[in-house]
Image (spheres, helix red, strand yellow):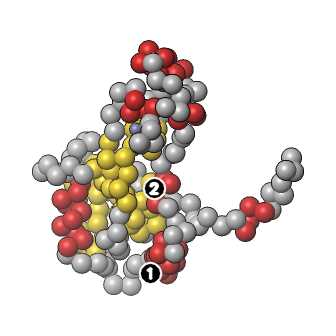
Amino acid sequence: MPKTKNILDLVNNDTGPILDIVRLNSNDTPVIPFTKEYAEVHLHFVHEPDIESYNHCNAPDCVLCDTGRSTTKKLLLPVYLPISNSVGVLPISDARRPGSLLPQILNVIQGGHNQIVFIRKINNFTFDVTTKPLPKGTDNGAKIIKRFITEFDSDRIDISSVYQRLSNEQLAEVPEIKTMMDLKGIPLGS
Ligand SMILES: [Zn+2]
């Protein structure tokens, strides 16, 4: 096995475009839905400063589940982002309370394509969603969406990759997680 590799080999090692998560905030974020296909993911929020982000659940053998940490389910919907002219991944909680994002997005998608949706986060559970028909002459992202769909359909894009996927071994390197594993008597690789 060679000790070094040619970095230019990575040029042809095309794993598709890098996707970004759509991070909603208290200002309107415009998105254009173009597909009904979504991915369902189960995540743990790892609050320790070493990680401090969502991480995929490693079920059925997950040290985070084994140490008693809750998971959260998110539905990931690809949408076109007219501001950055790119496709992003909108994470949607599966909650269906009044004001939740999912029922409002479902309403929009049922209404057909060619709508622009403005989403504003009021708090973690409540979103303000307004729609408008796409103004004539506006770039609807057709070219970028077409390229995305081609790659998505040929499995060259994994939209769940917008979230970190640390292994149990990597997670066990976080001192707080390791201590909890020791307290619960959970061996690594169980
Ligand atoms: Zn888990």
Q: Dot 2 surroundings within 10 Å: few (below 14), some, or many (20 or more)? A: many
The earlier-in-sequence mark between 1 and 2 is: 1
Q: Is residue 114 above or below residue 13?
A: below
Residue 96 on image: x %, y %: 16, 52
Instruction: Give the residue at mark 2.
Output: 160
Q: Quadrant of ligand 1?
A: top left
Q: In this view of the protein, which residue sits in the foreground, 6 or 124?
A: 6
Q: Is residue 126 above or below residue 118?
A: above
Q: In this view of the protein, which residue sits in the foreground, 14 or 79?
A: 14
Rendered residue at 41%/42% (across/down):
60
Rendered residue at 45%/32% (across/down):
63
Q: Which mark is residue 80?
A: none
Query: On the picture, is 5 further left or further right than 57?
Result: right
> From where the camera sits, is residue 163 visible?
yes
- Dot 1 amino acid type: Ala
Q: Is residue 61 above or below residue 12?
A: above
Examine the image and state in which quarter residue 129 appears: bottom left
Q: In this view of the protein, which residue sits in the foreground, 85 or 188?
A: 188
Q: Which of the two marks, 1 or 2, is nearer to us in this view? A: 2
Instruction: Give the residue at mark 1.
Output: 142
> From where the camera sits, is residue 176 visible?
no
- Dot 2 amino acid type: Ser
Q: In this view of the protein, which residue sits in the foreground, 169 or 55?
A: 169
Residue 157 on image: x %, y %: 52, 66
